[in-house]
Image (cartoon, rainbow, N blue to C red):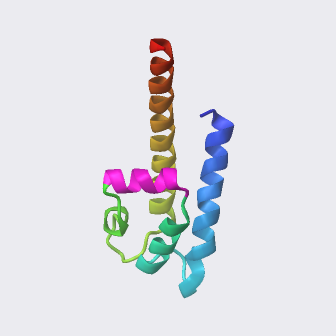
Amino acid sequence: MDELLIQNEIVSLNSIAANVEFMDSSAGLNRREFKRFCARLPERYTEIINEEGINFDTLDADKSGDIDADELKSFIRSVVKKCEVKAQQDLKKVQAQENLI
């Protein structure tokens, strides 16, 4: 992915988070809001979340009961980077298969 696409992905995921974040009238994602956030993610991200075993408890680093802005920012950047790496690996596989034909 090029840098502009990465930034667009980050903005998109932040927008999804913002849409569910204040359902309880407080900043940060509680467990229920995180579940809704994950349900709205594109499949390419839910695949990574499932493969990596990422869940609310693994993201709530300070064990506050909420995923705060810093934890969310770190998660979003990480998952977008992992998606980029996966996309590059998939592209290499396709190119290798095309070379065999």
Q: Tell me the chief SS of the magenta region.
A: helix
> Is 43 one of the magenta-colored residues?
yes
- Tell me the quadrant of the picture where the N terminus can be found: top right
In the picture, measured across the screen, residue 86 lies left or right of residue 61, that is right
Q: Is residue 51 above or below residue 14?
A: above
Residue sitting at x 58%, y 75%: 20
Give whichever of 100, 96 is nearer the camera: 100
Residue range corresponding to the magenta coloring = 42-52
Q: Horizontal and vertical percent for residue 18? A: 62, 70
Give whichever of 14, 43 is nearer the camera: 43
Residue sitting at x 48%, y 14%: 101
Q: Is residue 42 above or below residue 39?
A: above
In the picture, measured across the screen, residue 65 lies left or right of residue 88, that is left
Residue sitting at x 63%, y 32%: 2
Q: Horizontal and vertical percent for residue 76? A: 51, 54
Q: How many labels does the image show?
A: 0
Q: In this view, does 26 lie above or below 82?
A: below
Q: Horizontal and vertical percent for residue 26? A: 54, 82
Q: Horizontal and vertical percent for residue 84? A: 51, 38
- Quadrant of the rendered image containing residue 3: top right
> Is 46 one of the magenta-colored residues?
yes
